[in-house]
Image (spheres, rainbow, N blue to C red):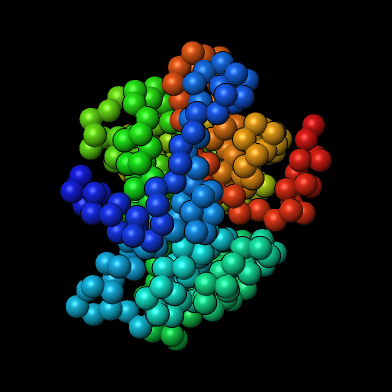
């Protein structure tokens, strides 16, 4: 994937744009869960999500190539699109982003605020992705997949920060969307020679990675239904799965009710707003708190991009 030297260079590049995000050991979370809980706050980036790191590194790489693209196009349900829009805007590179119908309006506004051309098409992410590939040829833009080497290298800088500041972690819980976040975490863990267990988390309504991990091969699903938009995946990419199946300890499935409970737990214990996907790692740790009793554990709060209406709706619906 990448070397320690490349990771250090990527970190320097990211930190020219924004400082390292914090990792805090929160007393109430630790008390409630019976273990030492560290939260990596990727909700504290300029786009309120970890993905921006990948956009910065990818676009820097592309602009330094012998043939820089005339523009970029990609599909997203939010954080990936914000990442490309933010990084593209910094260097004056046109970006077109395709999102599905009924996408989070806050995400749509944020993508447009970073200067991207926003197109709304299709009933879910996969439909939006197919449409983006169709119009790519019309625009002559470079298509950006949610899992590419430079994107993984960029997002891996959060893992580098975490492991440098928190010693001897027994485990890290991390959401799995398209796989860049967990793949980067696995690679950094291995580069640093650590024994920390990496535990992936998916929603019960979007179990494709859990099913694939259990089967040892990719198992696509026809649908993905969950309040956690960032993990609403039904078609894993081979490159991501190959890393996860060998470097991940296990994959935990959490219900929408558990996700909402974790969103509320974050707010009550830390006064941080977590989007659904950002809360799944805490939901999984809560589910496995007896297993993790007295251990030192980190959870990745991958993002806080959720509108007020949806947040209150999910919290009020907790069983």
Q: In the figure, 34 relative to 96: above or below?
A: above
Residue at 49 percent of width and 13 percent of height? 294
Image position, residue 117 (x, y; %): 54, 79
Q: In the figure, 68 relative to 154: above or below?
A: below
Image position, residue 81 (x, y; %): 50, 65
Name the quadrant containing residue 205: top right
The quarter of the rendered structure image containing the C terminus is top right
Q: Name the side, left or right, on which 59 lies relative to 44.
A: left
Image position, residue 168 (x, y; %): 34, 23
Camera sees residue 208? no
Residue at 57 percent of width and 60 percent of height? 77
Q: Name the side, left or right, on which 90 lies relative to 293.
A: left
Of 277 and 34, the residue lying toward us: 34
Image position, residue 224 (x, y; %): 61, 49
Residue at 70 percent of width and 56 percent of height? 307
Residue at 46 percent of width and 25 percent of height? 297
Camera sees residue 164? yes
Name the quadrant containing residue 149: bottom left
Q: Name the side, left or right, on which 9 lies relative to 154.
A: left
Name the quadrant containing residue 145: bottom left
């Amino acid at each position: 994937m990448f070397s320690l030297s490349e990771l250090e260079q990527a970190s320097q590049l990211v930190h020219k744009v924004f400082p390292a995000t914090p990792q805090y050991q929160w007393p109430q979370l630790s008390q409630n869960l019976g273990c030492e809980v560290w939260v990596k706050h990727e909700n504290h980036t300029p786009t309120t999500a970890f993905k921006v790191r990948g956009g910065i590194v990818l676009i820097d790489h592309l602009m330094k190539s012998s043939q820089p693209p005339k523009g970029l196009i990609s599909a997203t349900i939010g954080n990936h699109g914000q990442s490309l829009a933010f990084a593209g805007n910094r260097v004056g590179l046109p970006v077109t982003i395709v999102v599905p119908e009924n996408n989070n309006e806050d995400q749509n506004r944020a993508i447009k605020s970073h200067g991207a051309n926003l197109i709304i098409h299709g009933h879910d992410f996969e439909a939006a992705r197919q449409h983006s590939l169709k119009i790519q040829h019309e625009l002559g833009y470079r298509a950006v997949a949610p899992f590419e080497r430079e994107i993984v290298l960029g997002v891996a800088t959060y893992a580098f920060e975490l492991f440098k500041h928190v010693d001897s972690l027994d485990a890290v819980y991390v959401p799995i969307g398209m796989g860049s976040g967990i793949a980067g975490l696995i690679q950094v863990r291995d580069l640093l020679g650590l024994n920390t267990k990496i535990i992936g988390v998916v929603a019960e309504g979007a179990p494709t990675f859990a099913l694939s991990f259990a089967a040892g091969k990719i198992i696509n699903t026809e649908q993905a239904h969950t309040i956690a938009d960032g993990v609403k995946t039904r078609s894993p990419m081979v490159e991501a799965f190959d890393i996860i199946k060998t470097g991940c300890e296990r994959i935990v499935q959490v219900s929408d009710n558990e996700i909402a409970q974790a969103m509320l737990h974050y707010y009550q214990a830390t006064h941080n707003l977590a989007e659904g996907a950002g809360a799944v790692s805490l939901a999984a740790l809560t589910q496995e708190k007896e297993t993790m009793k007295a251990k030192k554990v980190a959870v990745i709060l991958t993002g806080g991009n959720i509108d007020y209406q949806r947040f209150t709706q999910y919290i009020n619906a907790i069983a």
